[in-house]
Each structure stands twice: as structure tokens, then as C-alpha cells.
Image (cartoon, coloured by chain):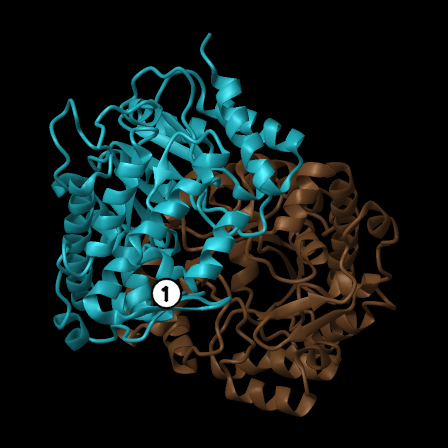
Chain colours: A cyan, B brown
Amino acid sequence: MSNTLRNDRLLRALKRQPVDCTPVWLMRQAGRYLPEYRATRAKAGSFLAMAKNPEIACEVTLQPLARFDLDAAILFSDILTIPDAMGLELYFVDGEGPKFRHPVRSAADVEKLAVPDMETELRYVMDAVRVIRRELDGKVPLIGFSGSPWTLACYMVEGGGSKDFARIKAMALNDPATLHRLLSINTDSVIAYLAAQRAAGAQVLQVFDTWGGVLSPAMYREFSLPYLTRIARELPRGDIQERTPLILFGKGNAAHLEALADSGAEAIGVDWLVELSEARRRTGGKVALQGNLDPAVLYGSPEAIHEQVRNVLASYGQGSGHVFNLGHGMSPDMDPEHVGVLVDAVHALTARA
Amino acid sequence: MSNTLRNDRLLRALKRQPVDCTPVWLMRQAGRYLPEYRATRAKAGSFLAMAKNPEIACEVTLQPLARFDLDAAILFSDILTIPDAMGLELYFVDGEGPKFRHPVRSAADVEKLAVPDMETELRYVMDAVRVIRRELDGKVPLIGFSGSPWTLACYMVEGGGSKDFARIKAMALNDPATLHRLLSINTDSVIAYLAAQRAAGAQVLQVFDTWGGVLSPAMYREFSLPYLTRIARELPRGDIQERTPLILFGKGNAAHLEALADSGAEAIGVDWLVELSEARRRTGGKVALQGNLDPAVLYGSPEAIHEQVRNVLASYGQGSGHVFNLGHGMSPDMDPEHVGVLVDAVHALTARA
């Protein structure tokens, strides 16, 4: 495995160092909008079969890089691998999203949980990281990731997706001690998981707090923020020179940008509901920022995409520290050609002569 | 019909006048969580059959008032009556929410739309207002309402609910002139609709901008805010002394509170994702505030509900101008007894000796 990275824009931007142009990658850039992905999935049989096979995970991770001038690869996996490895048994129902056969509903259920072993129960993830690093051969950096402790807990307690998060909010209100025990086990697991991905070769790490934004500010400060902060403080990621950057992405995290900037993470990922100019002002140069085009802009014409990309770049303004991304993941009905328009627009509009 | 209102707490709070205790009502307080509602619905056959029959609409409007010490009644109706009257044909599929048989997809579709006639096509709504006012007989004020121009447009263009609002956002990007024409017709209709409800007897008016919060700040300022502001400025609602208060409620409107406070509306309704202390500071005493308990708190124990009500009241702080409400509507699986706990807690915790 080569240690030389031929495209280090992402790492430089995350360290707020000068870049030749703004780096760009897209959440869910490897996915169903690509016909080659759908073909691989048809052969493999299911999403989970792909994610659990390192060679196939590598294949789909690399697919968008063959088409687009993206500045990073992101491990093809799921945010729910940790609870699956804890024994909750992840499965998918078409059109309904992820579900667990054994949800966590009581203090007794929480007592049974333990941090999974990374090189046995989650070995398939680490193997995928190793294979992808080998195949990337230094083309672009590889991003590893995990769900956040709160977001994992949402799925673990609800047993799947939810509109109102009634079960976990009831637990937060009626038995907060049990929820804190669950969040603590999840946090230990996320730290071990990201550390193992880093050891296997991941060069950037991202935590997805998909559901932090359903919490009132007071509940966010009690049930999500402290655990994100503990990850940022305790996750070993090397010395200052060679530090592996950590990105904390959260949907609906706009109310908490000051606190997130003080978490110890190198970068904060934001959705499209906050302007980057405001996010930059409120994070005070303490972190890099990732985002934040509304993914629905990919439904627009090439001209509209160009204009909206320009608006996001203008909102961030001059200087390094910006990683261009969507504010949320891509959808299956998006046009691959529009992704090319977006990626090229970011590079063209930010190229330093 | 008596013009004397025996409980005017809501009107006084909306005018930021002193009150004997904080008024409280709950979005979707007349609904499926009540067994008597489910019984009426079973007899009537469907939600729309209830909404379109003034006597039945009156019956279900009054049901929660018989159980709880609520300070307002809200017209039992739907936010989508206007596009239904425009000919889009509203219908409901169990578990999927509202749908339109004839969605608006093109400039030609928009050209065919006209402001409905309020005393023919929407007469059933005005009749319901008149019957409810008669039956309330001054017990509490009656709130009339409408969907916002943007929120109506979302359902009209998508043809129903949506996760990503792909169709309407594509229209916003690729053909903004057509979307503005649609929003303009919707705004004229909402103004005529609320004016007619007021003429029929509604004593407070609320606009629900349920989907404003899916827009980036720039798109919100282009496609939702100006139309809300036009309603606030153009809706006739009497002279200063007897002015009928207008409440602009929006899910996810926290980024826009300063602009909403300058819209000309008497009150702003907020969801639970912003603290009332912050909302109060940012609206600078220009408007009353309505909200903002997370509806999921009703899944908590009576003790937890009491504590969370106390937190919301403490966040608002001293002085009038607060209408207690949830940050969003109630759900069918909520316990009616918990609603009683909530309502009584608001009154007990704010009673002036």
C-alpha cells in the first residue's frame, strides 16, 4: 500500500491549509443513482450482502470515482453496523428502511449490550477498509464513518426509523439513566470502531448524527452533544502533524454550532438549513466546515446547479477550510450527469490560478 | 350568538396584555387520540366527511373542550381545503396522508387555477365556523386557520406528502416564475379564506407553514416568507382595539424569527427546536409567541410532563405574550389523561394570586 496521497485537497481543507481548489465529495456518492451500483446489487442480492463482502464494498466504493472527479472515497457501509454486531440483527424492508429484530426497550436489554470486538464481529468492515485502501492506491483519501451514539440509540430503541421518536423520547423522559447507559456503551463502541477503521487505513473519519435535530435544545445538550464531544476528545488520531481529521456531521445541528466547534473535532458538517457564512461566523475559525448544498438541487437543470453551487461557495467566502458536500445524502432518482456538473462546477469556480 | 367572551386569555396574551394565567391550546387537540372522536369518525365514515359536515365538524371541535380546561377551540378542518376547492380533489389513503387526484405540474396547470369562491365552494367551512361559534356561546374563542401559500404549493405540486420535495424544488430551480404565480394565487386565496372565516365568526386566525422548514434560508426568503408577509399585511382584521390576531406558525422557522416578527403578524408559533428565551430575545417584543413543548413529551409520565411544562414556561419567562402550545400537532397514540396533566400544569404554574 502506497502512503503517498496524489490528491490531498480534502486533508488540507480539513486542516484549514491552502488548497488549489475546494475539495468535494457527496454523502451517499456510492449508491442507487448509479446503474453500475444497481447491477452490482442485483448480483449480490441485497444491500447488506454488499456491505458485508469486502471485495464488493470496495467495488461500489470506487464506482463514483471512475465517473467523477471526486476528492474522496467513503467506505461503503451502513451507519448501523455497531448495533448489528451487538446482536440486534439489522435487516432491511424495501421502502421502509433499516430495522432491528431485537430492539432495546428496557434497562435489562441495555445491560445485555457490550462493545463489539472490532477484529472479529466487525472484521468485514476493517477488511473492506484495507481492500479499498489497497485499490485506491493513493488516488484520493478514504473516509471511514460511524453513526453517532444518539442516532444509533434512536434505531436501537425504536427498532427502525421513526416519525416522532416516541419510544426513545419516552425513555429520555421516564428513564434517563437507562438511556445514558445505552449512549455510553454506544460511545465506547463508536470510539473503538473509528479507531479500528483508522488502524485499518481510513484517513478521515466522520460521525453521522442523523437524528440529533429531532431533539429540543435542552435534550440535545443532554443526550447527543456530550457523547459527540467525548468521541472528539477520546478518539486517538495521531499527533498534530499527521492527525486524522474527525468530521461531526449533523442534520439540524444549526442551533449548536458554537458547542460543536468547541468539541475538539477538526470539522463540522452542516445541512442546508443554515448559511455557511453564518456557520463560519459562529464557529469562529476553530473548525473546517463541510457542506451544504440542498441535495434537491441535483433535480435542477445544469444551469441551476451551477448557480446554486456558486451561492454555496460565495456564502463560505474566501480562504481554506471548506469541504464542499451536500447537506444530506443523495437519492436513487438523481441523474448521474448532474453529479458531474456539480463536481466540475466546484473545482472550476474555486480554481486558484 | 353572544359576543361576550367568558374566557379571553388567548386574545389578551396574543395582544400581550396581562392575563390571570397563561392560555393553552394544542395543535390537533380534536383528533384520533380521543375515543369520542374515533366514534364520531366511525359513524361519519371518513375524515373528509366529518370536515365537510358543519354539524359534525362542530361536534369534534368541541370534544376536547368537554374534557380539558383549554383556552381555545380550533375549527375542525384540513389545511388543504383551498386546493381541493380549486379542483385538485383531495383524498386520503390510510397511513399515507393527504393526496390530490389532479396535482399541479406545469405552467398550464397553474394557469387553470383560480381563487375559490368562499361562500359557495368553501361554504361548508364558513358554515362550520358559524355553527361552532353558536355552540361555543362565548366559552372560549374560536381559531380559524389555513395552510400557508408555500405549504399548499408543496402538496399541490407533489400531489401529496413528500420526503424530499423533489418536484416543487425542481420547479423552484427550473421555472421559478411558474412557482411564483402559483404562490401568488395561493396567497390571494388564503387572504380571502381567512377573511371569510373571520366574517363567519373566527376570533383568531392561524397560518400553518408546515413545510417552510425544508427550504434553505435563501429559498425560504424567496418562496415562503414574502407570501406570509403579504398575508400579514393585506388580511383585513379590524382596527387596533378589536383587531383579530393572526398567528404565523412554522415548523423549522427558527432561522427566520426576526423577519417573521417584522411581517405584521400579531404572533409567531414555533416548534420545539428553538428555546423560547431565544425566540423572545430575537423577536424583541414585537409579537406574542406560541409554543413550544415537544409533542413527544406527552409520551412521558405525568411527572415528566409537569417538569417539561415548567421548563417551557421558565424559558419564556415573566410577562404576558405567551400562548402555551405544542411545537407540532398531537398523535393518535397519545394518552388523553396526559393532555389533562399538561393543561392543568400550565394553568397551575402560571396562576397570578
Residue A155 in view of the camera: yes
Specify the farthest residue to the top: A353
| Identity, as a three-letter code, of the amino acid under mark 1 | Ala
Asked if B50 appears above or below A136 in the picture, the reply is: below
Displayed quadrant of residue A305: top right
Q: Which residue is painted at 17% across and 68% down in the image?
A: A178
Give the camera-side residue of B73 and A145. Answer: A145
Q: Is residue B56 left or right of residue B294?
A: right
Circle 1 sits in a helix, a strand or a loop, which is it? loop
Residue ID for mark 1: B351
Q: Nearer the viewer, residue B291 or A94?
A: A94
Which residue appears at 42% of the width and 22% of the height? Answer: A22
x, y percent for residue B11: 57, 59
Total numbered badges shown on the rendered structure: 1
Residue B134 position, x and y percent, is 71, 78
Q: Is residue B290 visible?
A: no
Where in the figure is residue A188, as x and y percent of width and height?
14, 54
In this view of the protein, which residue sits in the foreground, B294 or A304? A304
Q: Position of residue B31 (x, y in %)?
A: 55, 77
Question: What chain does mark 1 sit on?
Answer: B
Residue B91 sits in quarter: bottom right
Measuring 56% from the left and 65% from the top, which residue is drawn there? B8
Left or right, A322 with respect to B160, comes to left
Callout 1: few (<14), some (14-19), or many (20+) C-alpha neighbours within 10 Å?
few
Quarter of the image containing the N terminus of chain A?
top left
Q: Nearer the viewer, residue A134 or A159?
A: A134
Give the answer, above or below, for where A272 lies relative to B293: above
